[in-house]
Amino acid sequence: MKKVLFIILGLFLLIDNVSASDYCTESTVEQMAKIIYREVGGTINNDPDEDFFAKLVTASVVLNNANRKSGVTFIDKMYNLTNSDYGGYSTYKTVPFENYVPASEQAKLLYIAELVLSGQFTVPKEMIFQADPWDIEPWGGIVWTSVKATCLNCSEAVYFGYSGSLSNEDTMGNALSSTSADHYRQLAASLRKSDYSSYTTSTICQHSNNNNQGSSSGNQGSSSGSNNQGSSGNNHGSSNGNSGSTNQGSGNSGSHSSSSGNQGSSGSGYTTTTNTPLCQNPNALRAIYIVKTIIQVVKILVPVIIIITSIISFSKTILYDEDIKKATGLFLTKVFVGAMIFFIPTIVKATLSFVDTNLKTFNFNECYNNATLDKIRQLEKKK
């Protein structure tokens, strides 16, 4: 029985890692793009490279902070961010992407979010702050770099910081070669484009991850960012969480940071998902959502019932002085069955995710992540 329990624990750990690798999907990219827009949308700095750098760092810190939250999938973790992480997040969290981000900025922000979520631009996992220095330091944070804001009606600068000491690993588990702000600025400049028109909601995560940035930035760099850790400090720097048509955010709330580049010879090390008609069909997604809900209820309810009845049965055995050895074996068997029922949905998801990633036969992860009430309503509105 001990061997069985170790096997179950091993499966749980393996499955948890598989689920955590599902970052780049339409839902996650759109959600991240909304946060980028709210925080540093519009033109923060008149230097295009510096402005692009600020947005990439912001997105990278969003990734780090979301990964600190609980959730089966990454979109679950993003939805579990709060207003203390990003000021006013609850007011736009469920607003459809195309209704919140102006059409003129959508393509660029989708590209930035995709760079981060596909692992091409990530920062050390300790990068969790985006705030003024006097908000970062009281929480034991260290300022990593800042981007001067040259726009109207925005804070003087957007600061990024980290907690503790920087490691050479990002939140996805990829190795980083540098934690230098200069390295990340060079990387951001190499990734910036003059035309983002090919980046739309229908092409999210279909672009290549193998962006070799050259000898000076081909390796994964690191960077820093920050979360607003104070209860009253969601809005840092100016009263401008949305500062007019040219600047949406600029140091609005919590945290951001940037970094990275090529994750190795094969790119990011993470396989991105692609969209299929099935995964964009609200009727099909509703059916998947119903199945997901039923499975969640069953996987919790059935094991609980089995364990409760087993305890009652085992207690009767002790009270009436029956064969305790036999009762113990039966009790452990029932507990094992209950545990397997609990893990079966996760095992099935992990298996289908593996098939999706390696055989490209069915886009399971995209459909599974899109099967939420918010996404279904959003797609129904598009029809």
Image: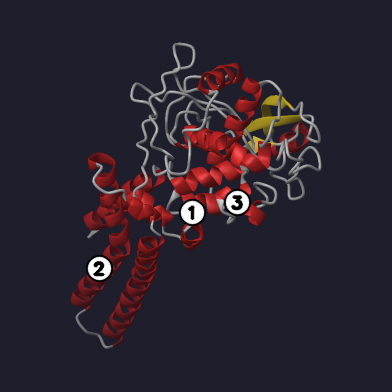
Distance, label 2 to label 3, CA atoms, is: 47 Å
For image coordinates 33% across by 71% down, the residue present is 303
Residue type, mark 2 in image? Val
**Residue nearer the viewer, 299 or 357:** 357
Outermost residue toward the top?
215
The residue indicated by pointer 1 is 76
Mark 1 or mark 2, whichever is nearer to me: 1
For image coordinates 33% across by 25% down, the residue present is 266
Residue 77 on image: x %, y %: 51, 51
Distance, label 1 to label 2, CA atoms, is: 28 Å
- Whether residue 65 is visible, yes or no, is no
Q: Secondary structure at mark 3?
A: helix
Q: Is residue 329 left or right of residue 94?
A: left
**Residue nearer the viewer, 290 or 169:** 290
Q: Quadrant of residue 341?
A: bottom left
Picture layout, residue 175 above or below residue 340 = above
The residue indicated by pointer 3 is 99
Q: Is residue 305 left or right of residue 245?
A: left
- Mark toward the start of the polypeptide (2 vs 3): 3
Q: Secondary structure at mark 1?
A: helix
- Mark toward the start of the polypeptide (3 vs 1): 1
- Mark toward the start of the polypeptide (1 vs 2): 1
Residue type, mark 1 in image? Asp
